[in-house]
Amino acid sequence: MITRLTWIPDNGKPETLTTEIPEGLLAQMRDLIGTPEWVASEAVMWINTKVGDQPWTKRLYRLARITALDPEEPS
């Protein structure tokens, strides 16, 4: 599912990107965002990401830095 992922990179300024996350996994991740387990997690995950007009690429994210996952509205 195409999703808007908001995360906080090392510079501390939130950034929103377009990502592709399977629907079931997206629901699980959304349920966990902000919980103490999520915030304290050291877990990382490769997520298919698109920035602007660049091609899709897999990028590694520390899950605790993800602050929001919002499904993109169909155009």
Image: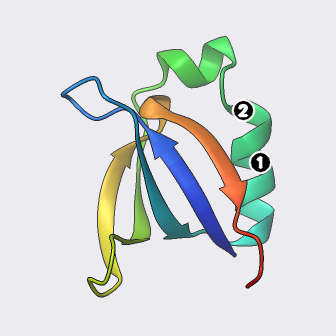
Where is 7 relative to 37, above or below?
A: below
Residue 54 spot, x, y in % from top left: 26, 83
Q: Secondary structure at mark 1?
A: helix
Tag of residue 32: 2
Q: Secondary structure at mark 2?
A: helix
Do the residues under discs 2 and 1 have CB atoms within 8 angstroms? yes
- For this orientation, the residue located farthest to the left is 11
For the point 68% across and 72% down, which residue is it? 22
In the figure, is residue 28 to the left or right of 10?
right
Front residue of 51 and 49: 51
For the point 28% across and 35% down, which residue is it? 9
Q: Give the alpha-carbon distance from disc 2 to disc 1, as whole Å.
A: 7 Å
Where is 24 relative to 75, above or below?
A: above
In the figure, is residue 73 to the left or right of 19?
right
Where is 6 relative to 56, above or below?
A: above
Three-letter amino acid code at the position of disc 2: Leu
